[in-house]
Image (cartoon, rainbow, N blue to C red):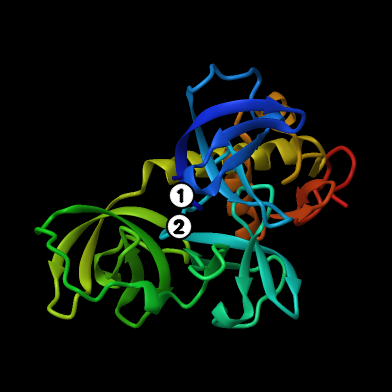
Amino acid sequence: MALIGRRNQLPYVREATPGFYLDGGTHGEILLPGRYLSRRPEPGSLVDVFVYRDSEDRLVATTEDAYAAVGEFAFLRVVSVNPRIGVFLDWGLEKDLLLPIREQAAPLRPGDWLVVRVALDQRTERLIASARLNRYLNITPPAYPEDQPVSVLVIGESPLGYNAVVNHAHRGLLYHTELPGPLTIGQPLDAFVRRVRPDGKIDLALDRTRVGYQRVVPLAEKIFAALTASGGRLPLHDNSPPEEIRAALGVSKKAFKQAIGVLFKAKRIVIEKTGIRLAAPVKGGPGRAG
């Protein structure tokens, strides 16, 4: 059976005008639009896809990666607001992720960034986000030994340090006194366990910046340099074809979106429908930043 909001290995069934149909088990056949595969799979072969619901609430498959799967936490950007139902978040897929009003912890506007957990509504089988993080953090003390490597996501600051989600499951704390400098909300890190407290919270020490995050920062600087060289504007944006992004910058669309997210959060660029531009004009450069 296909798992909604997760990656699946689904058997290929048949081809039709819209694309390729995969066997979703009890969910029936699931469409993989033709643009995601360059050629027809062999009959019965397994196709690696992410399953979610499209704008018409139908199950659909994609070969693209979401920034987070069901049960995971992520730092996402608000792309639009519907006062009646909630806000929509960019999570790396064609259809944005809904953060319902009931799951918001504070009012939000387009361009805001926040940490959320991706969840599957058991009643409707719809994917949603929740900013009410505490309800999803396990308070049962985990059986982590001292110095156990863990992945963490920074979710807030306290007088003692930075609160973090540990391995998408537990609450941890990185102490100010053990950090070389400030951290930022939504920053992913590799850390190691210092101590598991009786209340289930985990004292952490910083190990090293996660490899994936290390790749994003240099790319962000590369994009910033390209913007400067072009006079402050590039005709690349969230909806640009992957081939166009790769031809211009030599990187995947997912990496590009993560990198411009870093630049946007740092208020170094502005993201527009037709492209990206520097937040301030380029002095003496060709053209203008707008």
Q: SS class of the residue under badge 2?
A: loop
Instruction: Name the spot of residue 90 as percent of width and height, x first.
Output: 64, 56
Q: Give me the C-alpha separation between circle 2 and circle 1.
A: 9 Å
Q: Nearer the viewer, residue 83 or 109?
A: 83
Image coordinates for residue 240, horizontal then vertical, percent = 76, 38
Q: In the displayed structure, does residue 55 sit left or right of residue 123?
A: right
Residue designated by label 1: 3
The answer to whether residue 94 is seen in the rendering is: yes
Q: Quadrant of residue 156?
A: bottom left
Q: Position of residue 109 (x, y in %)?
A: 71, 74
Closest to the observer: 133 or 266?
A: 133
The amino acid type of the residue labelled 2 equals Val
Q: Is residue 19 left or right of residue 289?
A: left
Q: Are marks 2 and 1 in contact (CB under 8 Å)?
A: yes
**Nearer the N terminus, badge 2 or badge 1?**
1
Query: Crowdedness of circle 2 by 10 Å Cα count: few (<14), some, many (20+)?
Result: some
Location of residue 196 in the rendering, given as x and y in whole percent from the top left corner: 14, 70
Question: Circle 2 is placed at which residue position?
Answer: 70
For image coordinates 66% across by 60% down, the residue present is 267
> Quick check: can you spot residue 250?
no
**Position above or below: 91 against 119:** above
> Could you tell me the amino acid type at mark 1?
Leu
Where disc 1 sits, the SS reads loop
Q: How packed is label 1: few (under 14 Cα within 10 Å), some, or many (20 or more)?
A: some
Front residue of this view, candidates 93 and 264: 93
